[in-house]
Amino acid sequence: MLIAATLAIFVAMILAIVRGIAGPTLYDRILAVNMFGTKTVLLISLLGFVMGRPEFLDIAIVYALINFISVIGVLRYSDTNQLKHTSDNNKSTKKGF
Amino acid sequence: MDIIIIIISGLCLFVGSFLCVTGGIGILRFPDFYTRMHAVGVTDTLGAGMILIGLMVLSTDFLVFAKLVMVLLLTLLVGPTTSHVLAKAALHNGLTPTVDKGAAKKNALEPINNEETTSSNP
């Protein structure tokens, strides 16, 4: 069951990275990266149990912290008019940015 | 006793894997950013929680259990916070949700049609 869960996490990561590459807006990409990071934490924990090395959980904790800080940092940066959503074909209402 | 632990852990891992794959299909197939974020934000937290609970049942060492509890608490705190901040930033920076224009117009016109029929009846 551990190996099956690992394969399911792999499938979810592949789907997330497809959306991250094809995402039409910036926020789709940020969402896909966030989901990819969460799934990576789960994958590291599961691989630690599959390979018989539960010390991998330390890496999982650090990865969860780094993922949260990076996403919050990018979104904080997006408040400074640098990342305004500008394309017209996605029903953006703000013009001139 | 051993088989019960294996069955409980397998059940939790199965539910968690199913939720994770469902979130992946949702992020790929939904039409709008906000619906995609709904799919991911709902399934991500519960899927991670179920998988970590399944690993907790399997763990024998107390230190491993404590580390899994820390990862679970971190995930439960971080997932909804990230979803909230992401939705707020997207709405604040001008990404409007896609609305079905035909359905909205029909819903707006329905009271007028009812009014016409009621006024034409007498």
Image (cartoon, coloured by chain):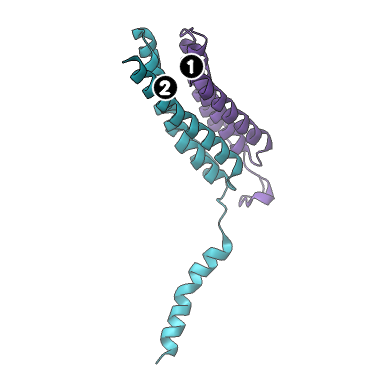
Disc 1 packing (10 Å; few <14; some 14–19; many ≥20): many
**Looking at numbered disc 2 in the image, what kind of residue is underneath it?**
Leu
Location of residue B109 in the rendering, given as x and y in whole percent from the top left corner: 50, 73
**Chain B takes which shade in the image?**
cyan
Pick the front one: B10 or A78:
B10
Report if residue A41 is visible in the image.
no
Dot 2 falls on a residue whose secondary structure is helix
**Quadrant assignment for the C terminus of chain B:** bottom left
**Quadrant assignment for the N terminus of chain B:** top left
The residue depicted at 44 percent of the width and 74 percent of the height is B111
Location of residue B113 in the rendering, given as x and y in whole percent from the top left corner: 48, 79
B71 w.r.t. B36: above or below: above
Pick the front one: A80 or B122:
B122
**Chain A takes which shade in the image?**
purple
Q: How many circles with numbers are drawn on the protein?
A: 2
Query: Would you name the residue on which mark 1 appears?
Result: A45
Chain containing the residue with disc 1 = A
Query: Would you name the residue on which mark 2 appears?
Result: B52
The residue depicted at 65 percent of the width and 34 percent of the height is A18
Pick the front one: B69 or A69:
B69
Location of residue B94 in the rendering, given as x and y in whole percent from the top left corner: 57, 47
Dot 1 falls on a residue whose secondary structure is helix
Location of residue B24 in the rendering, given as x and y in whole percent from the top left corner: 56, 35
Marks 2/1 in contact by CB < 8 Å: the verdict is yes
